[in-house]
Image (tube, grey):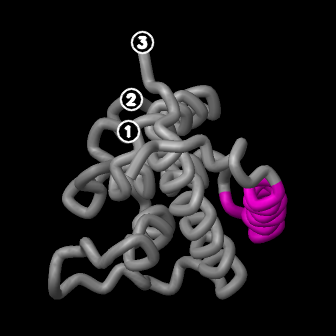
Amino acid sequence: MAHVNLGKQHPAAYKSVLALNEEVEEAVARAGLDAKLAELVKVRTSQLTECAFCLRMHTRDALDKGETTDRLAVLAAWWESQYFTEHERAALAEDVTHHMEPAGHEWDNGSLSDEQVSAITWLTIVMNAWNRIAVRSHYPVAP
C-alpha cells in the first residue's frame, strides 16, 4: 500500500485528531501531571510504535522542558533503571500501547489518582494515533 499524507487526504479527520490532542493536553494539565512526564509518555509510546518523526519531535520537546539526556537514554528500559520515581514508573506502564512490562511486576503503585490514570491513558491513545498518522503518511525524518 502506498504512503499517502493522511491529513491532506482527509483534513476533517486530521482536524478531529488535533482537537482531541488539545483536549487531552488540557486533561493532563488539569490532572496536575508534570509536562516533562507527559513528554516521557509521548517518547515511550513513540519508541513502542517505532515512529521516528514523533521520537525526534518529543525528545526535543522533553529536552526543552528540562528532561535530561540520561533519563531519555534509559527510557526504553525504564523499569530496569533507578532514574524514575514511583509516580513516573506508574505513568510509564505500557499496557495501553501493548503489554511490555516484565512478568511479575505490578506498576500500579497507587501514586496516580484516577484522574491522572485517565489523562495518561488518553495521552497514550492520542500519541498512538499521531504515531500511526506520521508513519503511514511517511513524514520525513532527516538530519
Q: Please, what secondary structure does the residue beneath circle 1 have?
A: helix
State the residue position of label 1. Answer: 72
State the residue position of label 2. Answer: 69
Do callouts 1 and 2 mark residues in contact (Cβ within 8 Å)?
A: yes
Q: Position of residue 85 (x, y in %)?
A: 43, 60
Residue 45 visible to an observer of this rendering? yes
For the residue pair 115 and 140, the one nearer the viewer reads as: 140
Quadrant the C terminus occupies: top left
Q: Position of residue 127 (x, y in %)?
A: 56, 58
Q: Is residue 5 left or right of residue 110?
A: right
Q: Please, what secondary structure does the residue beneath circle 3 have?
A: loop
Region rendered in magenta: 12-33
Image vertical order of residue 113 relative to residue 68, above or below: below
Checking the image for residue 143, the label placed there is 3
Q: Please, what secondary structure does the residue beneath circle 2 have?
A: helix
Q: Position of residue 91 (x, y in %)?
A: 49, 68
Depth-wise, is mark 3 or mark 1 nearer the camera? 3
Residue 29 visible to an observer of this rendering? no
Image vertical order of residue 118 relative to residue 138, above or below: below
Labels 3 and 2: the sequence-earlier one: 2
Q: Is residue 94 left or right of residue 27?
A: left
Task: Locate residue 55: give its quadrant.
Answer: top left
Q: Is residue 113 left or right of residue 97?
A: right
Task: Locate residue 104: give its quadrant.
Answer: bottom left
Please tell me whether residue 28 belongs to the stretch shown in magenta: yes
**Amino acid bearing label 1:** Leu
Alpha carbon of mark 3 to alpha carbon of mark 2: how far? Answer: 19 Å
Labels 3 and 1: the sequence-earlier one: 1
Classify 10 Å Cα crowding around label 2: few (below 14), some (14-19), many (20 and above): few
For the residue pair 78 and 10, the one nearer the viewer reads as: 10
